């Protein structure tokens, strides 16, 4: 199977796209995944970007994207968008795509879906497309949730309908039974990590290229490599000594420093980190007259929670605003912590079963809280004053 087919299958298996087509322009043109419209073909020829991916998102993602795109180019304040996309340009038809793709990695085309150009191939295009999908979804729901909470007019009806559809098709609460006694050997640790990573992606708690996972055992940290797919971790795990500030390879997750600090507290054995959509959305709804509004992703001062998971600010990377300075201390007393606009970290003292359960519970709490905000705003706008 080609890499192109592999990523088309992933998008379909995770039910993220109804259609997914790659156009590869080398000496000749190859098409994977279905038929391509003449306009899209024209765009591919014009751009000569090597690899073009078009996806038509499934519902409720497509409608959420349409709504996020109503005002044109959009940029929610989540970490995936800030890191990978900056902004998502919006086009009215395929004719405007090549212009937009000259300055951005991906574009949303109204009525059609996402087009992304990737010089490095299938995997890169897949990452960009799934980031846009995430970005538009987060944008629509976080804006609507915030407006509802502030009593501003917003599309509560659509949000509730899309939310119900999302819960029905994408929110899973039945958890698989993961390996126990994982610390018997290197082999058992590595296979338990691969298993937990796959389960996290299959449960829809993260798109495969994001998130990370680790185990601490016998003065070593076993951690997924940066840029690895969480559902294909078999050969993508580094083993780093706990007492060294760096790991020999440069491949270990960029979040190794945070993991190492979390493990300084005794009784923490495994860490699972994912980007569950509604935990991210709820973490971004900070309306309590926060002094640092606009800077909440690194300097929020409000004490807020998703369920019982405290929300902390913190950026990706190693700078003074990085989560390595906020997350580990919050994890000392909590087994689940949510980083503003980014995702959830959970820990467990044994295997991945508890960590996965906590992740799912945090996301369930986020969904419930979100739904209550919308329902409360509906009642308050309907009741006579
Ligand atoms: Zn992350
Ligand atoms: Zn804030």
Image: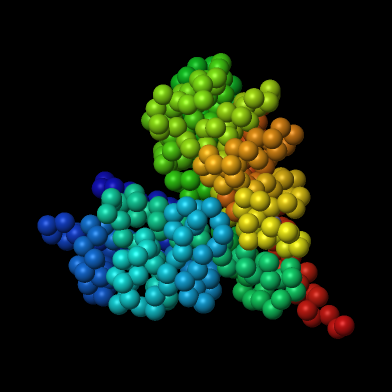
Q: Quadrant of residue 328?
A: top right
Residue 34 lies left or right of residue 320; in this view the side is left
Seen at 50% across and 17% down, the residue is: 185
Above or below — where is 64 with respect to 209? below
Residue 77 lies left or right of residue 104; in this view the side is right
Query: Horizontal and vertical percent for residue 195?
Result: 50, 34
Above or below — where is 17 with respect to 315? below
Query: Horizontal and vertical percent for residue 301?
Result: 73, 51
Using the rendered image of the protein, determine whether residue 243 is visible from the camera's viewpoint. yes
Using the rendered image of the protein, determine whether residue 11 is visible from the camera's viewpoint. no
Above or below — where is 213 with respect to 69? above
Seen at 61% across and 29% down, the residue is: 261
Query: Horizontal and vertical percent for residue 39?
Result: 26, 75
Residue 34 lies left or right of residue 259; in this view the side is left
View extreme (front): residue: 320
View extreme (bottom): residue: 384
Q: How many marks?
A: 0
Specify how the rendered protein is coloured: rainbow
Query: Horizontal and vertical percent for residue 197?
Result: 50, 38
196, 98: nearer the viewer: 98
Instruction: Name the quadrant of the C terminus.
Output: bottom right
View extreme (left): residue: 27
Seen at 67% across and 66% down, the residue is: 145
Seen at 81% across and 75% down, the residue is: 380
111, 343: nearer the viewer: 343
335, 226: nearer the viewer: 226
């Amino acid at each position: 199977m080609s890499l192109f087919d592999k990523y088309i299958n992933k998008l379909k298996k995770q039910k993220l796209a109804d259609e997914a087509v790659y156009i590869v322009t080398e000496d000749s043109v190859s098409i994977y995944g279905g038929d391509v419209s003449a306009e899209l073909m024209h765009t591919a020829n014009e751009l000569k970007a090597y690899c073009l991916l078009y996806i038509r998102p499934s519902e409720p993602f497509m409608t959420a994207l349409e709504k996020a795109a109503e005002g044109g180019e959009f940029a929610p304040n989540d970490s995936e968008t800030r890191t990978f996309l900056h902004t998502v340009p919006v086009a009215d038809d395929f004719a405007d795509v090549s212009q937009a793709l000259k300055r951005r990695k991906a574009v949303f085309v109204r009525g059609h879906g996402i087009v992304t150009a990737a010089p490095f191939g299938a995997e890169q295009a897949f990452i960009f497309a799934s980031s846009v999908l995430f970005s538009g979804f987060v944008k629509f729901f976080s804006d609507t949730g915030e407006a509802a909470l502030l009593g501003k007019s917003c599309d509560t009806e659509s949000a509730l309908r899309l939310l119900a559809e999302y819960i029905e098709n994408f929110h899973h609460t039945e958890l698989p039974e993961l390996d126990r006694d994982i610390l018997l050997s290197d082999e058992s640790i590595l296979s338990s990590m691969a298993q937990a990573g796959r389960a996290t992606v299959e449960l829809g708690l993260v798109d495969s290229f994001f998130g990370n996972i680790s185990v601490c055992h016998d003065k070593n940290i076993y951690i997924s490599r940066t840029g690895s797919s969480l559902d294909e971790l078999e050969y993508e795990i580094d083993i780093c000594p706990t007492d060294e500030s760096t790991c020999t390879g440069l491949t270990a997750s960029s979040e190794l420093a945070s993991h190492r600090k979390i493990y300084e507290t005794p009784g923490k054995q495994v860490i699972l980190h994912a980007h569950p959509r509604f935990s991210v959305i709820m973490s971004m709804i900070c309306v309590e007259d926060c002094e640092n509004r606009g800077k909440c992703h690194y300097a929020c001062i409000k004490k807020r929670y998703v369920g019982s998971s405290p929300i902390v600010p913190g950026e990706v990377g190693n700078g003074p605003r990085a989560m390595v300075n906020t997350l580990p201390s919050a994890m000392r007393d909590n087994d689940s912590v949510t980083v503003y606009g980014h995702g959830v970290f959970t820990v467990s003292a044994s295997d991945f079963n508890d960590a996965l359960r906590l992740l799912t519970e945090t996301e369930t709490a986020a969904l419930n809280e979100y739904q209550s905000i919308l329902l409360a705003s509906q009642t308050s706008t309907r009741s006579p004053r």
